[in-house]
Amino acid sequence: MNALHFLGNYSKELDDWLGFLGVLQILLAYFLNVTGTLSTKAFMFKILNFSGALMAFFASYLLRFWPFMILEAVWYIISFINLVGLPKKSISTIETDLHELISNMNPHLNYGEFVFVSISDLYDIYKGDAIAGFKEEEGTTLILKKDKAMQLNLPFGTTMSWITLKVHSSLEAVGLTAAFSGELSKHGIACNVVAGYYHDHIFVDKKNAKMAVKLLKRLSNRNTVHID
């Protein structure tokens, strides 16, 4: 009888803890999303929803509370599908819709320090040294790693950080540059944009790099919520 009483109490405590931890994780995911800390596409957001729904489902099962059990079962299935993913567009698909572009920007901060230089002679520059370049009347502008520019004794100005927008944007897309540059300018962050064939690349003052990424993610999250 004592053993049965102990198991009953243990089961009740397990109900409470599973339910509490499950709901806490779901609420945490929602809070981080609305504050712009986590995108709905972030792995941490998905795993918090998935594990939270699973715990809440088991808690409701132990309680035999059917309405909550059905609710959590549906939430668990949705979060599982969101975690593992459904067949998506090919990674080579070129986006032109502005809402899709902004909501899928996925800004990535690349490692390293970079500078803009202008040179007249490319003799000392190897192909792999330059991140990008453009020939102007006054000279050829190159984007180099800072240590390489220093090694070559090339004059430069601001030390930059390099942010890549992972969305595959069309060169004919309208409004993306205005959207993210406008968002950054609201917070006093200047940006230099280089459009590659696949992605847009943003160079900002190194001291503003983390804030710029945070602002870009927040812009992306706001647009996602707006679409949904």
Image: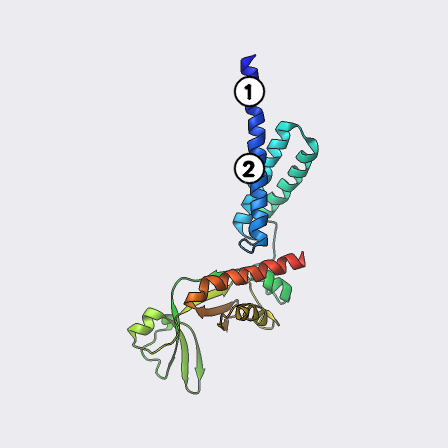
Residue name at image x 54 percent, y 63 percent: 216
Residue name at image x 33 percent, y 73 percent: 149
Instruction: Farthest residue to the front: give it.
Output: 187
The front one of 69 and 36 is 36
Q: Secondary structure at mark 2?
A: helix
Q: Position of residue 136 (x, y in %)?
A: 44, 84
Residue name at image x 67 percent, y 59 percent: 227
Give the amino acid at mark 1: Leu
**Residue 54 shows in this picture:** yes
Callout 2 crowding tier (Cα within 10 Å): few <14, some 14–19, many ≥20: some
Callout 1 crowding tier (Cα within 10 Å): few <14, some 14–19, many ≥20: few
The front one of 175 and 209 is 209
Quadrant showing the N terminus = top right
Quadrant showing the C terminus = bottom right
Disc 2: which residue: 21
User: Would you say 57 lies left or right of 116 here?
Assistant: right
